[in-house]
Amino acid sequence: MRDYHNVAIQKSRIPLVLFFFGILLCAITGRLFQLQVFKHSYYQKIASTQHWIKDEIPAKRGQIYAKDSLSGKSYLLATNQALDLVFVEPNKLEDKDKAAQFLSEVLSMDKKEILDKIKTSPTYVPIKHKLTKEQGDKIRDQKMKGIGLSIENWRYYPEGSLTASTLGFVNGEFRGSYGLEEYFDEELKGTPGLLKEEADHAGIKIAFGNDVSKAPVDGDDLYLTIDRYIQGEAEKRLNESVKKFGATNGQVIVMNPQTGAILALANAPTFDPNKYAEIKLNNYSIFKNKAVSDTYEPGSVFKVITLASGLDAKKITPETKYEDTGHVDLNGYTIMNSDRKAHGLCTMTYVLEQSLNTGSTWVQQKLGKNSYYDYVRKFGFGELTGIELPGEAQGRVYEPKELNDHGYATMSFGQSISVTPLQLITGFAAVANDGKMMKPYLVEKTTNSHGKNKIIPPKEIRQVISPEAAKDMTKMMVSVVEKGHGYQAKVQGYKIAGKTGTAQVPKKNGGGYETGKNIGTFVGFAPADDPKFIILAKIDEPKGIPWAESSVAPIVGKMLDFLLKYYQIPPTGKVE
Amino acid sequence: MKDRTKRRKFNRNYRPHFKLGKYSFGFVVLALILVISLLYLSQSNKIAIRGYDIAELEKQKQELLAEKERLEIESSRLQSIQEIEKGLKNSGMVPVKKINYVTTSSTVALNR
């Protein structure tokens, strides 16, 4: 009986145990189902992050080169540099004082400054950017816990401030600002790639694992028309003159009139694009390339455009005479010569040599307002040149209906019109190039990441004046340098064609011109018979210098002397 | 008694008859699977080791490329106009003042 009772008890316990195991099995199965089915994608993602490494591969920004016209060699103006950043993880430092002492010795920084920085965050504190190789190696070798290095990519300009206003710079967000860096930002920056491969726990790629990485496409390299030595000389001469005369700013442009290639484009004052962040907010105008972005009334230098138009329209010849009474009265205003004199019977060549306002007014009146307006527009004024720089100004040319006779008369000697220095030299280059205007350009070649070159050829805009008119105009301009106000641009043994211009500075709030202030401009080209280069120099508000022949003509003279020697062009006349 | 030295009757059409039982067959298959697995494991291991070697060489290559870039940049800086002008001051060189151009009617020059 007893045995039967025990067996019965045992038999009743078995289903109970089975029942509990059944519940446990269901619970486990249910949990597995929940993890592997409902949360499948969630855990798959976590697993993926553990055995896949994913990162963006930055593309290398394209480089920018200047050239040496004689050797054909290219020189780097802008490139990329990978430099160390040293950072501290304060919560991992064993001895903050020791760490600060070590860093202050290596980085030549104040120890207190480092300690103060360490206090700012418990987890991550950057200490210094752009370490030298030696500094990085010392920190790397020390292997101090809590101190680490990471690579940062920077834009670097090996030539410093050379061509700074043309290049621009790359800002903290790695975007081009000002200059070519901004204009060609899309082409220069390239396309980043993607690193996506299977890796082990240490992050090292598994050889037989999957790799779906995509290579980056590096940015295009730019090869400029700028000649490094000519640019250096232009900046040197310009900086000397701006400093000497206490001027507010200045520009020099050197161009090949036969192609439109810009050989030099200098602005003063300038900046070092490696240190752009040091420029104060109220001085940001220093980043602008004033040769293309700022307009001004060019003054007497514009008489070349007026007389060239008259020659082409066959209204005048270099020997055409007119009677100079010293003044012209129009619409209640009187136009006088700068020397306040009457010169009597004058030829057109004499008008240009002595820069007579009455003479240019006479030529403009012979042309008539409509014809004169057409010629001024044909010379490229009032339209963009299309130079590869951002912020180019268009200038202003008043239509005949917008200005009265007096206004148009003043336009003939460079007032009542606003132009950029680049527009001026481009218009003059047409005179130097048998009347043919070429588009000014800075980039002659681009090379993509596969090494494929794209050549940008010179582009003719239009035939502005006839070759005969251009030739006559050139002879008159040679006379300006030989006998007129441009004598300081003379180079012994060579025929130099040029024209000075001393413009008044308009008052900021309108109503006339500032007294005692002027803008000096000189445009010259050589050799006059077969021009190889044309130069424009402009100095704003030189102190104590009333005329451009004293401020800018000497710059052009020295530049022409340098260029004629640099290109080894033999003299055509006697050299004493 | 049977004669144990009696030779088996010679059969000209004798063909060796190989028979594998189901257990032996299974054992052979298992053994093959094991061998192939070991070979695969060995190859994978070798590839993985090579992979680490490649990763190490890649790292060295990147370091050398970085060093090359650094030297190229330093070379560009040393060839800059500013550096050249600094060097000119110490070299005693002077600017060219006058160039004498020689004109000749002949296109022949003496070769020494």
Image: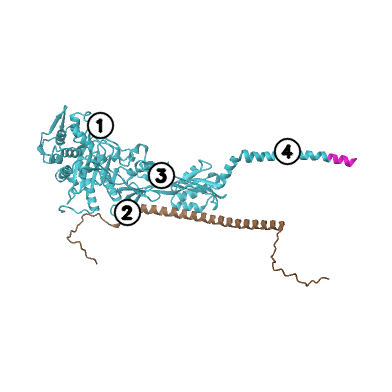
Chain colours: A cyan, B brown
Q: The numbered mark 1 sits on a residue in which chain?
A: A
Query: Cα distance, mark 4 to mark 1?
Result: 96 Å
Q: Spatial distance from mark 4 to mark 2, Cα to Cα?
A: 84 Å
Could you say which is closer to the camera, residue A348 or residue A375?
A: A375
Tell me the amino acid under the disc marked 2.
Answer: Lys
- Give the labeled residue for mark 4: A23
Q: Nearer the viewer, mark 2 or mark 1?
A: 2
What's the chain of the residue with tag 4?
A
- A118 or A322: nearer the eye? A322
Residue type at mark 3? Lys
Q: Which residue is mark 1?
A: A507
Q: Are marks 4 and 2 on the same chain?
A: yes
Residue A329 is situated, as x and y percent measured from the top left of the image, at 14, 29
Crowding near the residue tagged with mark 3, few <14, some 14–19, many ≥20 C-alpha atoms within 10 Å:
many
- Identify which residue is drawn at 25% across, 32% down: A507
Residue A547 in magenta stretch: no
Of labels 4 and 1, the one closer to you = 4
**Residues indicated by labels 4 and 1 sit on the same polypeptide chain:** yes
Helix, strand or loop at label 2? It is loop
Task: Give the residues in magenta.
Answer: A1-9
- The front one of A542 and B33 is B33
Mark pair 3, 2: CA separation: 24 Å
Residue position marked by numbered label 2 in the rendering: A73
Tell which circle, 2 or 1, labels the residue nearer the N-terminal end.
2
Q: Which mark is residue A189?
A: 3
**Which badge, 3 or 1, comes first in the chain's sequence?**
3
